[in-house]
Image (spheres, rainbow, N blue to C red):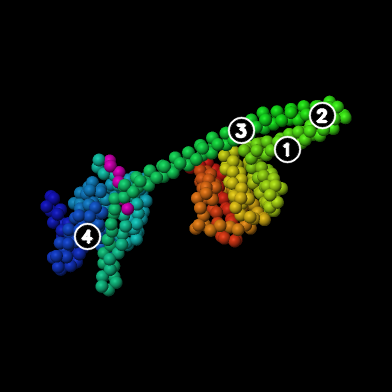
Amino acid sequence: MNQNRDKLCQAQAGEAVACENPVCEDAFQQIADNIDEVFWMCAPGTRDLIYVSPAYEKVWGRSLAELYANPCAWLDGVHPDDLERLKDIFLEKRCRGEFDEEYRVIGPDNTVRWVRDRAFTIQDDHGHVCRVAGIAEDITKYKLAEQELQQSRTQLRELVLRQNWDREMLRTRIAREIHDELGQSLMALNLNMYWLMHHLPEEDTRLADKAQEMIDMIVDIVKSVQQISSELRPSMLDDLGLAPTMNWYLKQFEERSGVDCDVSIRIDDTQVDSDHATAVYRILQEAITNIARHSDASAITVKAETLRDYLTMEIRDNGRGFDQNNINMRESFGLIGMRERASALGGNLEVVGKRGEGTRLYLTMPLGAVT
């Protein structure tokens, strides 16, 4: 049986080469017998096989004789989840040399292999298609590496989400402790100072001036504590939502920096959960901080809106911009952090800058569950 199969293969190979030179036929046979890829050839527009290389038996785990007897026998080894798709396009594309598909093959021992199968046409001297040939390559190791990489990315995204969540919880706790403990102590101290002022001898103006100076210092410290607490985690983000918090933050920035802020925020807070609200607010905060530190901008435009199941945010400035091909690592840490926050929730962040023409940041984030 094997001898008959070998003779059949050699005969088909000789016809495939269509060369009268025995050396040419021998070279073809040696190449076909020793390559790991499955080389196949058929008549154009038909299922009739002219030649299939021996590698078929290694990849499919099935005999060549069976395949020559039934040119569609290779489909018997195709994974059920891929079979219907291949059946639909097999006659339409494969026999015309337009086939380029990846699919899985299950061997008799239930071993699963990934295959990339590509077809191309062979033309005669007159430009007519005389053969359709193809190469089926075992790409299992590449697919496994791709799956491992995807799994690593998923794990990394989950790790980033967890780290961000832990960081926000820590910031929230610290902000509350600063506001509740330190803030209340300062207010109590301020009240005691007012009581002391009203009980000082009226003729001792030096003590009264010193007491007033201390009261003014306490008031400044209270403001600083409130500012630090808000920077750590603004309570209004949890109480009022993302849109009011963004407006408040940008108004505070405009008053402190003198940079003109043109703000248009049309966010439906009912669509934005806590994780997404936190991520968008932190991206805004980091972007504005970068502008204040590096851009020398005199004006900023911030536009944000929810549309269907997406949130978009655009931040532009008229500052000095930057050379994207020459940005150093220290300057890029902020960009990396913003991209990680966006990516962890399935979003995408683009930052475009050009020297002397300002910077544009554009965020697109889906509001559904991350898959």
Closer to the N terminus: mark 2 or mark 1?
Answer: 2
Question: Amino acid under label 1?
Answer: Asp
Q: Residue furthest left?
A: 3
Question: Amino acid under label 2?
Answer: Met
SS for callout 4: strand
Closer to the N terminus: mark 4 or mark 1?
Answer: 4
Which span of residues is magenta-colored?
A: 110-116
Where's residue 190, x and y in %?
76, 30
- Looking at the image, which is closer to me, 89 or 180? 180
Q: CA distance from mark 2 to mark 4?
A: 107 Å
Where's residue 225, x and y in %?
68, 36
How many numbered discs sit on the rendered protein?
Answer: 4
Q: Which residue is mark 2?
A: 197
SS for callout 3: helix
Where's residue 232, x and y in %?
62, 38
Question: Amino acid under label 4?
Answer: Ile
Question: Amino acid under label 3?
Answer: Ile
Label for residue 220? 1
- Looking at the image, which is closer to me, 14 or 280? 280
Closer to the N terminus: mark 1 or mark 3?
Answer: 3
Q: Residue at 59% x, 46% y: name it.
A: 286
State if disc 4 and disc 3 touch (CB < 8 Å): no
Q: Nearer the viewer, mark 2 or mark 4?
A: 2
Q: Nearer the viewer, mark 3 or mark 4?
A: 3
Q: Which residue is mark 3?
A: 174
Q: CA distance from mark 2 to mark 3?
A: 33 Å
State if disc 1 and disc 4 touch (CB < 8 Å): no
- Looking at the image, which is closer to me, 119 or 352? 352
Q: CA distance from mark 1 to mark 3?
A: 20 Å
Q: Which residue is mark 4?
A: 50
Closer to the N terminus: mark 3 or mark 4?
Answer: 4
